[in-house]
């Protein structure tokens, strides 16, 4: 697995150290354990929420699981602390609209990461990043 992680960027002519990361979350239904169930009102899902950070090639950098009613802006602080502890050289992190607000400035001052919020347009077309 380590071989795959370090060789993939090299074969694509990229730097081994990732400078761009992506964060997102996913709410999923979860078993019968009442203590681990929350309700995500936006997605109408009772269960848990997985918060992940990947590099620009899709390799997993950090993952965190919370109950579903924890908002992205609350969980992102712990996710960024995890990235910082792993000494990830990421500088810019695109994210969806769930991460907008005051949290962007807090992350920049505490951890040095720049969060770029990408909003979906009204006609629901997909926005792409040019790397």
Image (cartoon, rainbow, N blue to C red):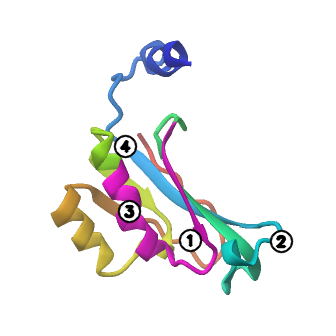
Disc 1 and disc 2: Cα gap in Å?
Answer: 34 Å
Disc 2 and disc 3: Cα gap in Å?
Answer: 26 Å
For mark 4, does the 10 Å Cα neighbourhood hold few (<14), some (14 to 19), or many (20 or more) residues? some
Badge 1 is on which residue? Answer: 120
- SS under mark 2: loop
- SS under mark 1: loop
Task: Kindly tell me whether residue 53 is visible in this rendering.
Answer: no
- Disc on res. 78: 3
- Position of the C terminus by quadrant: top left
Badge 2 is on which residue? Answer: 32
For mark 1, does the 10 Å Cα neighbourhood hold few (<14), some (14 to 19), or many (20 or more) residues? few
Badge 4 is on which residue? Answer: 20
For mark 3, does the 10 Å Cα neighbourhood hold few (<14), some (14 to 19), or many (20 or more) residues? few
Task: Give the residue drawn at x 33%, y 23%.
Answer: 15
- Mark 2 or mark 3, whichever is nearer to me: 2
- Mark 1 or mark 4, whichever is nearer to me: 4
User: If you read the primary sequence from the N terminus, does the residue marked by circle 1 or circle 4 appear first?
Assistant: 4
Q: Does residue 79 belong to the magenta stretch? A: yes
Q: Which residues are magenta?
A: 60-82
Looking at the image, residue 55 lies above or below residue 110 = above
User: If you read the primary sequence from the N terminus, does the residue marked by circle 3 or circle 1 appear first?
Assistant: 3
């Amino acid at each position: 697995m380590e071989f795959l992680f370090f060789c993939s960027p090299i074969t694509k002519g990229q730097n081994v150290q990732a400078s761009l990361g992506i964060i997102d979350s996913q709410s999923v239904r979860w078993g019968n354990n009442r203590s681990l169930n929350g309700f995500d009102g936006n997605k109408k899902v009772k269960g848990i929420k997985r918060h992940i950070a990947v590099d620009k090639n899709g390799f997993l950098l950090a993952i965190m699981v919370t109950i579903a009613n924890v908002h992205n802006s609350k969980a992102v602080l712990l996710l960024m602390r995890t990235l910082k502890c792993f000494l990830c050289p990421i500088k810019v992190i695109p994210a969806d609209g769930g991460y907008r607000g005051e949290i962007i400035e807090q992350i920049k001052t505490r951890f040095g990461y720049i969060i770029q919020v990408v909003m979906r347009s009204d006609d629901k077309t997909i926005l792409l990043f040019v790397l």
